[in-house]
Amino acid sequence: MATPTINDLLPEPILSNIIASVSDVRSRNSVALVCKRWRLLERATRTTLTLRGNIRDLYFFMVPTCFRSVIHLDLSLISPWGHSLTTSSAASLTDPAIIAQYLLLAFPAVTSLTLYARDISTLQLLARLWPDLKQVKLVRWHQRPQLATAGEELNNLFQQCRSLCSLDLSSFYCWTDDVLLALQSNPLVSSNLTCLNLSNPSFSEGFKSDEIKEISKACPNLKEFRAVCMFDPRYIELVVGDEALVSIATNCPKLTILHLADTNALLNLRGDPENEGFTQEDARISVPALIEVFSGLPLLEELVLDVCNNVRDSGPAFEGLNSKCPQLRHLKLGQFHGISMPVESTLDGIALCERLESLSIRNVGDLNDMGLIAIARGCCRLAKFEIQGCKKITMKGMRTFVHLLQRTLVEVKISCCKNLGASSSLKALEPIQSRIQRLHIDCVWDCNEEDLNKLDQGKMLNQSFGHTNYWRNDDCEYGGNSKRRKYLDDLNCSYASMDVNDNVYYNRGKNLYDLNCSYGEMAVNNNGYDNGNGFGEKTWDRLQSLSLWITVGQLLTPLVSAGLENCPNLEEARIKVEGDCREMSKPSERDFGLSILGNYQNLSKMHLDCGEITGYSQTAPSGQMDLSLWERFYLFGIGGLSLMELDYWLPQDRDVNHRSLSLPAAGLLQECYTLRKLFIHGTANEHFIMFLLRIPGLRDVQLREDYYPAPESDTSTEMRADSCCRFEAALNRRQVPD
């Protein structure tokens, strides 16, 4: 008698619910391979699907018809990248109306759609298919087409989809006038919107004050609002200031997520570490207005204010945030000064927001170590912390901050801080190196590991460590012993009053007094081991994702010696290289140093972003390297890594808007024999892209022009629609070992 299996014992409704609860795409694909019954149940319960492949296959046998329950459908990744569903090459084979019928028959239950809408015809075609759409995300990196009237595309969408409640334009190249006119022309749809995402870097100036007020007035039921705004005070009548912010709180009191950022903040470019953090002009935002905004948004859970201009003495505005917005868990601030200025033992500003779980601060010019420590004392539930452009923060202050939050902190980003290079950042994070999961640091090789060890041995090992050094410094404002005791005994955010389920159940005062332990004792207590000389080993047990920033021309090879020797569970590496190489001479070394990542045995995913490298695309002056040689420099050694997924952003020549894969890069990429998925963010010559067919297990390849503005028409030597079709046909003809 055969042994019964789970397939025999479980009734179909229970098994169906179990399979429906699996969210990971790869896991669902594995479930579908078990047996025919499981395959049918998996297909019947899948609610999210992203279609890949060529546009010409949408209306033939390649369209899957077994996903009848799909609610969220993504059509934005169909290749050739960015081409319309009604282009001449597709329409010459089949009428667009037939394409629409195929999609409707295959996916009748769709209520959420993501679409690359390069022109209005695509939007008109698909908006009629599903008039009951509730969520729409539009994508377009190409230039906005010339329309008969402003807002014509969005008007057409609103008129076809009256039940729309969520609109995402964060990757849709359009004008601010298009959005405002469409919302005002369709009051019924606008009043139904609960989610509106306008955080689009293509808006070079952002939404002006009057536009923000009109949008918030037209959409009174918004729960999520994200927008890029004009905070530059030089535009006196147009700048977003107190009046616009108060209007948001007045018109949209149901907001739970509010993101307002300057266009420059969305570009995410690294600033100058020598910058003091203060701009020449002050934003037109006052503390009383902020207090009024917070009072009008009691349901707020997530707040982003990144204004790129000074908001001075803002601490008092955030002191009442904990009581006015009791559900606030995520906070991101840019260019807000005075957010934490503790006097003796009193916590103030952000330090009073004790419920925060995620905090990001950027360019806070007056934040020092004592303010950072006060934030750690008050915000004792932080799991994610990001700090950028804070010149006064040192390794000792950051290390004390991390030690106070060692029970909760699992994700840290340290960027553009003058006193926190790679080695010092990793040294500061040692108290949580056994539990941190995601990490970003700047590859600024400040000093080597040996120098830091000497510094610790000479100045810390025989004294009280870290936090206590501040108390014993005669020049410190807390230098007196009585003041130190008063500071340590302060219980403005007592751990004893918190729930045990928060994993914080020890007394605040006791925790701070424990910092009197020696360095060696701390290493044993925090990491569970000691190597005999008082310094813990560099094992980052739970680190899964590592993000690095490095300037052009610098090498990656010192990374291991800086403190990342052993990362046994590291799965993903994200590397961003930034800078202008046009005036640089040839590097002294042959390669960037990607081979150093071979030390991480489980590394399978990489994002290599060279998109901010600016150089000469074809002809460089005498003695200078063109971009093809720089690509060889950065990709050399990548074939030695066991990568399964790679996202590669090509370097660029901004003068001609040129991002194209070079011959050396194509030759090096073909050596990645373990690759399964490859996304190249740019264009490529057809001959070069054919090199990738030599990768035996490669299944998923796409060229994306996802940068502003994407080229309207490729030149004769670059990837065209027909070239892309020939490559994909050759890729699909291969027998891929599984």
Image: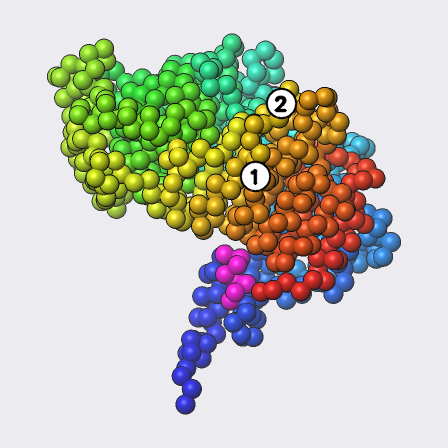
- The quadrant of the image that shows the C terminus is bottom right
Q: CA distance from mark 1 to mark 2?
A: 22 Å
* Image coords of residue 519 (percent x, y): 21, 31
**For marks 1 and 2 on the same chain, the one whose residue lies earlier in the sequence:** 2
Residue 30 included in the magenta stretch of the image = yes
Q: Closer to the camera, 31 or 666?
A: 666
Badge 1 element: strand
* Residue lying at 81% horizontally and 50% vertically, measured from the top left: 722
Residue 388's label in the rendered image is: none
* Residue lying at 36% horizontally and 33% vertically, measured from the top left: 426
Residue type at mark 2 is: Ser
Q: Main secondary structure of the magenta part?
A: helix
Q: What residue sits right under mark 2 in the picture?
A: 585
Query: Could you tell me if the residues under marks 1 and 2 are in contact, i.e. CB atoms within 8 Å?
Result: no
Badge 2 element: loop
Residue 716: quadrant of the picture = top right
* Image coords of residue 663 (percent x, y): 71, 41
* Residue lying at 53% horizontally and 28% vertically, measured from the top left: 554
Mark toward the viewer: 1 or 2: 2
Is residue 190 visible to the viewer in this orientation of the structure?
Answer: no
| Magenta span | 24-31
* Residue lying at 68% horizontally and 31% vertically, measured from the top left: 627
- Residue 320, placed above or below residue 600: above
